[in-house]
Amino acid sequence: MITTDAMIRIAKVYGNLIVDVEATNAKLIERQKLIVMAATECDRTTAEQAFIACNNHCKTAIVMILAGLNAQQAKQNTS
Protein backbone atom coordinates (compact mmCIF):
# COMPACT_ATOMS: atom_id res chain seq x y z
CA MET A 1 0.00 0.00 0.00
CA ILE A 2 2.86 2.38 0.74
CA THR A 3 4.43 1.64 -2.64
CA THR A 4 1.13 2.25 -4.43
CA ASP A 5 0.69 5.58 -2.64
CA ALA A 6 4.22 6.60 -3.61
CA MET A 7 3.61 5.69 -7.27
CA ILE A 8 0.43 7.79 -7.30
CA ARG A 9 2.19 10.79 -5.80
CA ILE A 10 4.96 10.76 -8.42
CA ALA A 11 2.56 10.31 -11.37
CA LYS A 12 3.48 6.77 -12.33
CA VAL A 13 -0.11 5.54 -12.47
CA TYR A 14 -3.06 6.01 -14.78
CA GLY A 15 -6.32 4.89 -13.25
CA ASN A 16 -5.47 1.61 -11.59
CA LEU A 17 -2.49 0.86 -13.86
CA ILE A 18 1.17 1.51 -13.14
CA VAL A 19 2.30 2.99 -16.45
CA ASP A 20 5.79 4.34 -15.84
CA VAL A 21 7.83 1.15 -15.59
CA GLU A 22 10.98 0.27 -17.49
CA ALA A 23 10.54 -2.81 -19.65
CA THR A 24 13.71 -4.86 -19.16
CA ASN A 25 12.61 -8.25 -20.48
CA ALA A 26 10.06 -9.84 -22.81
CA LYS A 27 7.53 -10.45 -20.03
CA LEU A 28 7.54 -6.79 -18.97
CA ILE A 29 7.36 -5.61 -22.58
CA GLU A 30 4.28 -7.75 -23.11
CA ARG A 31 2.75 -6.50 -19.87
CA GLN A 32 3.29 -2.89 -20.95
CA LYS A 33 1.60 -3.51 -24.29
CA LEU A 34 -1.39 -4.94 -22.42
CA ILE A 35 -1.40 -1.87 -20.17
CA VAL A 36 -1.45 0.41 -23.23
CA MET A 37 -4.37 -1.60 -24.62
CA ALA A 38 -6.26 -1.46 -21.31
CA ALA A 39 -5.66 2.26 -20.74
CA THR A 40 -6.62 3.32 -24.25
CA GLU A 41 -9.07 0.57 -25.24
CA CYS A 42 -7.17 0.20 -28.51
CA ASP A 43 -6.35 -2.94 -30.46
CA ARG A 44 -3.06 -4.80 -30.17
CA THR A 45 -1.64 -3.46 -33.44
CA THR A 46 -2.24 0.16 -32.42
CA ALA A 47 -0.72 -0.46 -28.99
CA GLU A 48 2.38 -2.14 -30.44
CA GLN A 49 2.91 0.60 -33.03
CA ALA A 50 2.64 3.35 -30.41
CA PHE A 51 4.82 1.43 -27.96
CA ILE A 52 7.56 0.99 -30.57
CA ALA A 53 7.26 4.62 -31.74
CA CYS A 54 7.76 5.73 -28.12
CA ASN A 55 10.89 3.61 -27.65
CA ASN A 56 9.05 1.10 -25.44
CA HIS A 57 7.78 3.75 -23.01
CA CYS A 58 4.31 2.76 -21.90
CA LYS A 59 3.25 6.11 -20.40
CA THR A 60 4.23 7.99 -23.55
CA ALA A 61 2.43 5.49 -25.79
CA ILE A 62 -0.75 5.98 -23.77
CA VAL A 63 -0.54 9.77 -24.11
CA MET A 64 0.21 9.39 -27.81
CA ILE A 65 -2.93 7.33 -28.43
CA LEU A 66 -5.33 9.17 -26.14
CA ALA A 67 -4.28 12.67 -27.21
CA GLY A 68 -3.76 11.83 -30.89
CA LEU A 69 -0.16 13.04 -30.79
CA ASN A 70 2.97 11.77 -32.49
CA ALA A 71 5.67 10.15 -30.34
CA GLN A 72 7.76 13.32 -29.98
CA GLN A 73 4.77 15.44 -28.92
CA ALA A 74 3.61 12.76 -26.47
CA LYS A 75 7.09 12.58 -24.95
CA GLN A 76 7.06 16.33 -24.34
CA ASN A 77 3.73 15.98 -22.55
CA THR A 78 4.98 13.21 -20.23
CA SER A 79 8.24 14.84 -19.20
Image (spheres, rainbow, N blue to C red):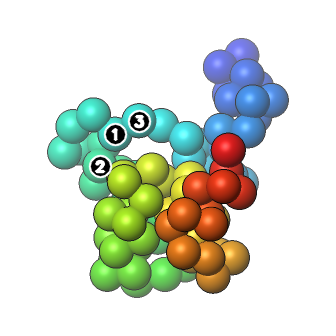
Q: Position of residue 12 (x, y in %)?
A: 65, 38
- Residue 23 — which label? 1
Q: CA distance from mark 2 to mark 1?
A: 5 Å
- Residue 22 — which label? 3
- Based on the displayed image, in which of its 4 quarters is residue 7 positioned? top right
Q: Which residue matches tag 2? A: 29
Which amino acid type is marked by label 3?
A: Glu
Which amino acid type is marked by label 2?
A: Ile
- Based on the displayed image, in which of its 4 quarters is residue 50 positioned? bottom left
For image coordinates 33% across by 70% down, the residue present is 48
Q: Relative to 34, is 4 on the left or the right?
A: right
Tag 1 secondary structure: loop
> Label 1 near label 3: C-beta < 8 Å?
yes
Q: Relative to 53, is 38 on the left or the right?
A: right
Farthest-out residue, left: 26
Q: CA distance from mark 3 to mark 1?
A: 4 Å
Say which of 22 and 73 sits in front.
73
**Crowdedness of circle 1 by 10 Å Cα count: few (<14), some, many (20+)?**
some
Q: Position of residue 24 (x, y in %)?
A: 27, 34
